[in-house]
Amino acid sequence: MRYYSTNRQAPAASLEEAVVKGLAGDRGLYMPERVPRLAPDTIARLKEMTFHDIACLVARAFFGEDIEADTLDAITRDTLAFDTPVVPVGDRIYSLELFHGPTLAFKDVGGRFMARLLGHFIRKEGAGRKVNVLVATSGDTGSAVANGFLGVEGIRVYVLYPKGKVSPIQECQFTTLGQNITALEVDGTFDDCQALVKSAFMDADLNRHMRLTSANSINVARFLPQSFYYFNAYARLDERGEADALVVSVPSGNFGNITAGLFAHAMGLPIRRFIAANNRNDVFLEYLRTGRYNPRPSVATIANAMDVGAPSNFARILDLYGSEGGDPYPRIRQLIAGHRYTDEQIADTMRRVYRSTGYVLDPHGACGYQGLADSLRPDETGVFLETAHPAKFKGTVDRILGSDIEIPAKLRAFMEGKKQSIELSKDFEGFKSFLMSR
Ligand SMILES: *Cc1c(COP(=O)(O)O)cnc(C)c1O
């Protein structure tokens, strides 16, 4: 399979090139040249298959031409060392729990798959070609990527995060690991961290000195594997006879997760419609309403992993529905609805659901739940993606619910580790000389 750039100004790439480079040379995002389709009788049989078998089937459809089947299956199975169960929460509303991985958020799936795939390509190339992964994080990405890559040979990871702006629970998940993971504490904002990473990719000296790649959700190896759990959610609901008119609601920030769902749909998965559930950062909702896309600086909310003002995967959504030259807008509006929630509304939802069902939503999942509660029609079944364990946002959740939720043992183990980080200023020269010295 070849991968083209959404900007169409860079040559098409192999899977290996697309994964190692991350972003295309013209700053576009890589897209697979074809979306493989599963036959209807395969879809009908998904309910008889396990999550692992479903994931291997989907992985082979995308990556099967480029990686030998045994290796690909091993990478896929090893990625999914945890389940993503579908749990009933309310009337015809299910939670797709994506927080059972090592860092308790959905990003574990993409982070682990990408780490294993990149590790495979580097081993294939042979010794001496170390790859350096740069990742800017506002909290959850850094932990998923760092833990996904921990101990993977031939790869060094640098996690850049804004000093004092990441919760202690999030911070300990990437600052206590050691080995091939280096945490860089930047005296600035998340945007400053992202700017440092972008400048590094553009810098000729640095690129001569070391091989750099990105592990943000722009990487095809991070976003595509997220389609695995959409297929599994469908299968598990089909098993219950509940998959006929399925609506999937995705708490969205950079729109990588929902884009993976749209790919699953394009592969033939029968999802009736999608909901992009947003906090106050609502550029996508505005696009749905007006047809105009106006990226702008993000505003801070209690669902902070979705505080994104210029969602990078928007380019992929436009491309997916506009690749035949037509206007993607009508199709996008038909398939995806948008909802937007303020912090007060998110808190109300969390309280209401907790009191009536005992289910503890995290602030991101709450947006997804409420998108369904506000729009589900009588014949539809809804699934929202519960993207993180509520304990990752314990301060906020306890304040809203008046609770004292338990911290899972996995998370406590990180909190007991010793913090190791290197402090940097937000200016590029300092960052550059640090990397040049490595
Ligand atoms: C990253 C993240 C999101 C947003 O996902 P995107 O793929 O960027 O849209 C939502 N919830 C949580 C908990 C996250 O960590």
Image (cartoon, rainbow, N blue to C red):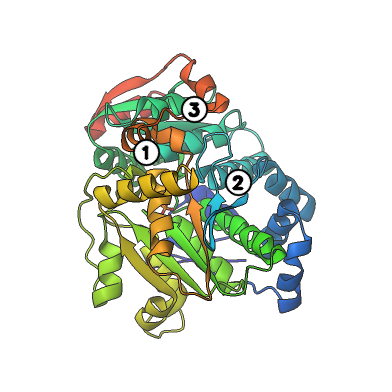
Where is mark 3, residue-wise? 406
Is residue 410 found left or right of 421 in the rendered image? right
Residue 113 numbered mark, or none: 2
The quarter of the rendered structure image containing the N terminus is bottom right
What x and y, as percent, mark residue 212? 45, 41
Please state which amino acid type lies under the numbered disc 3.
Glu
Tell whether label 3 touches label 2 (CB within 8 Å).
no
**Distance (Cα) linking label 1 and label 3:** 25 Å
Q: Secondary structure at mark 1?
A: loop
Ligand 1 neighbours mark 1 (CB distance < 8 Å): no
Earlier sequence position, callout 1 versus callout 3: 1
Quadrant in the rendering for residue 199 = top left
Please state which amino acid type lies under the numbered disc 1.
Thr
Where is mark 1, residue-wise? 137
Is residue 320 found left or right of 339 in the rendered image? right
Ligand 1 neighbours mark 3 (CB distance < 8 Å): no
What x and y, as percent, mark residue 296? 20, 57
Quadrant in the rendering for residue 164 = top left
Residue ID at (26%, 75%): 289
Please state which amino acid type lies under the numbered disc 2.
Phe
Q: Secondary structure at mark 2?
A: helix
